[in-house]
Amino acid sequence: MITLGLSSEEGATVVRATGRLDLSSYAQFRDGLLKCAVTEPTAIIVHLLDGFDASGTAELSVFATVWMRVSEWPGVPVMVVADDVLRTTLELNGIARFVPQYPTVRLALDAVGAPRARRRHEVQLPFSTATPRLARGFVRDTCERWGLLGILDDAVLVTSELVENAVRHAKAAPSLRLELRPGQFAIAVRDDHPSPPRPRPLTSDRPGGRGLPLVAALSKTWGVSPTPRGGKVVWAVLPLADSAMTSE
């Protein structure tokens, strides 16, 4: 059983963890950290308290797993604060290559640095058969305003699939968030249903419904992240030139 205490400090989320990390608590610990990333703090700082214990080095790979899941979206850095023994164990297992380690929370906060530049546009969509069409119009308008004509068609197709999944399968009124950062354009669709989207066969008879294989083919990467309120965010990242990050 793992106990997580959360606090916000200087824009970062500090997660104070105690308890035993083993195969039975691995998923709980992983998902708890992933939920913190959805709110986009400046960093997730995991403070392993004296009562924290890992049953084996394999379980400590959870930090690398979380880092991999959040590095592309929402792009939140993950840090670990631990005693000398745990930091040495993490370093010997190669986890320190991805997740920096510090002896105190204060040193971790000092190392966070300025957030990456980004531009964001978000809309709450209705639960309706017209929702995918509204989402496509929102993406077109945003891409044109931001000068992203080179990825407009791909962005519309990916958004249409993600939004249609939320309406058809999650039976939800989704929110759609578009983010522009250096080198990438992110599409994130949030709904209140916890189940991940299910792949469907590719079809060509409608703008949406072409399946998650299409999302994977058009995106640099995509994934599903749990939200603190029990729902999920399905997201995809499209690559683009850094020069696309211009003023509106």
Image (cartoon, grey):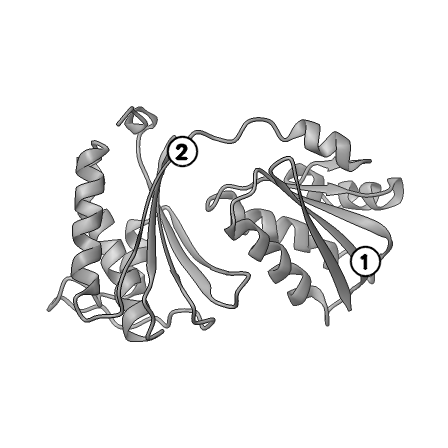
User: In the rendered image of this protein, does residue 89 appear above or below residue 149?
Assistant: below
Q: Amino acid at mark 1?
A: Thr
Q: Which of 155 and 89 lies nearest the eye of the viewer?
A: 155
Residue at horizontal 64%, vertical 49%?
Answer: 64
Whether the residues at callouts 2 and 1 have beta carbons within 8 Å, the answer is no
On residue 58, the disc is none
Instruction: Name the spot of residue 63 as percent of width and height, x first.
Output: 67, 50
Residue at horizontal 52%, vertical 31%?
Answer: 115
> Sequence order check: which comes first, mark 2 or mark 1?
1
**Quadrant hosting residue 172:** bottom left
**Furthest residue toward left:** 205
From the viewer's perspective, is 85 left or right of 31? right
Instruction: Name the spot of residue 195 as percent of width and height, x first.
Output: 45, 73
Residue at horizontal 59%, vertical 52%?
Answer: 36
Circle 1 residue: 18
**Quadrant hosting residue 99:** top right
Q: Quadrant of the N terminus?
A: bottom right
Separation of residues labelled 2 and 1 (CA atoms): 34 Å
Circle 2 residue: 118
Residue at horizontal 26%, vertical 55%?
Answer: 159
Instruction: Name the spot of residue 209 as percent of width and height, x first.
Output: 22, 68
Q: Amino acid at mark 2?
A: Arg
